[in-house]
């Protein structure tokens, strides 16, 4: 399945028809009614082992698990809402690598929280003083430190030490404008970022 979103409209598409000679234009299987819980859909995530299910986050701060095959909501999460500022929606979301059931949420207020979606429990919270979270990425590797990177609307990149639960370093003016994407290469100390300046940049972290 493929899930696409535009505002409050979320569609599910059948990918099993791709490649068929008779198929020229795919028709969606249906639409998910996310507006009552999410408002506009702002982020989506498919956690490992969650068969036919996706996490969808929204402008209202809502987070819900949906079954894309039946197009039904499975669960609406509550734990992350306890300290969510009024009007602060979820701006981005990513799974925690190599840790089942864990995802990171970034908010328009600058808040970051790690949540166990199986238990609906927040396990860690951070606060980015640079404002809205525009991107999230975890560093991976056998001997890599527990680092999370977040992007900011002023073009800064914040590196978080998850063991000490505080900011480790800030790269000011990494981009001229908001950070739009941040990704670590799997198992490598290399971070790729892009921003509203249409630049693609590579950052190499000290391995010593």
Image (cartoon, rainbow, N blue to C red):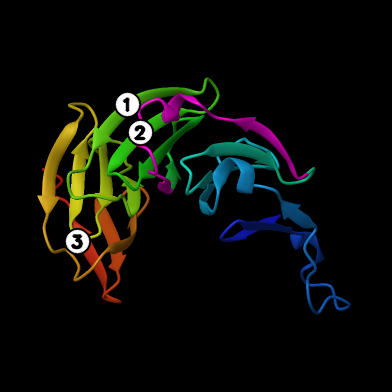
| Residue 149, above or below 84 | below
Question: Residue 123 sits in which quadrant?
Answer: top left
Q: Which mark, by number, is residue 147?
A: none
> If you read the primary sequence from the N terminus, does the residue marked by circle 3 or circle 2 appear first?
2
> If you read the primary sequence from the N terminus, does the residue marked by circle 2 or circle 1 appear first?
2
Mark 3 highlights which residue? 154
| Residue 23, above or below 140 | below
Q: In the image, 182: left or right of 70?
A: left
Point 51% across, 39% down: residue: 62
Q: CA distance from mark 1 to mark 3?
A: 24 Å
Q: In the image, 124: left or right of 42?
A: left
Mark 3 surroundings: few (<14), some (14-19) or many (≥20) residues within 10 A: some
Q: Nearer the viewer, mark 1 or mark 3?
A: 3
| Residue 53, above or below 162 | below
Q: Which residues are magenta?
A: 71-92
Q: Secondary structure at mark 2?
A: strand
Q: Which mark, by number, is residue 124?
A: 1
Mark 1 surroundings: few (<14), some (14-19) or many (≥20) residues within 10 A: few
Mark 2 highlights which residue? 113
Check contact, mark 2 vs mark 1: CB within 8 A: yes
Point 78% across, 71% down: residue: 26
Mark 2 surroundings: few (<14), some (14-19) or many (≥20) residues within 10 A: some
């Amino acid at each position: 399945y493929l899930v696409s979103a535009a505002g409050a409209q979320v569609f599910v598409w059948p990918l099993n028809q791709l490649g068929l000679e008779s198929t020229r234009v795919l028709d969606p299987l249906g639409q998910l009614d996310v507006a009552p819980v999410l408002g506009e859909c702002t982020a989506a995530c498919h956690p490992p082992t969650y068969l036919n299910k996706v996490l969808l986050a929204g402008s209202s701060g809502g987070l819900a698990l949906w079954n894309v095959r039946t197009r039904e909501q499975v669960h609406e999460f509550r734990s992350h809402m306890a300290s969510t500022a009024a009007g602060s929606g979820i701006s981005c979301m990513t799974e925690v690598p190599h840790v089942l059931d864990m995802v990171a949420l970034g908010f328009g207020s600058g808040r970051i929280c790690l949540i166990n979606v199986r238990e609906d429990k927040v396990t860690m919270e951070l606060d980015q003083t640079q404002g809205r979270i525009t991107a999230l990425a975890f560093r991976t590797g056998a001997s890599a430190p527990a680092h999370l990177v977040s992007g900011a609307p002023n073009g800064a990149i914040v590196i978080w030490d998850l063991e000490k639960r505080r900011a480790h370093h800030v790269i000011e003016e990494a981009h001229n404008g908001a950070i739009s994407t941040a990704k670590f290469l799997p198992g490598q100390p290399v971070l790729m970022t892009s921003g509203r300046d249409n630049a693609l940049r590579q950052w190499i972290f000290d391995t010593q």
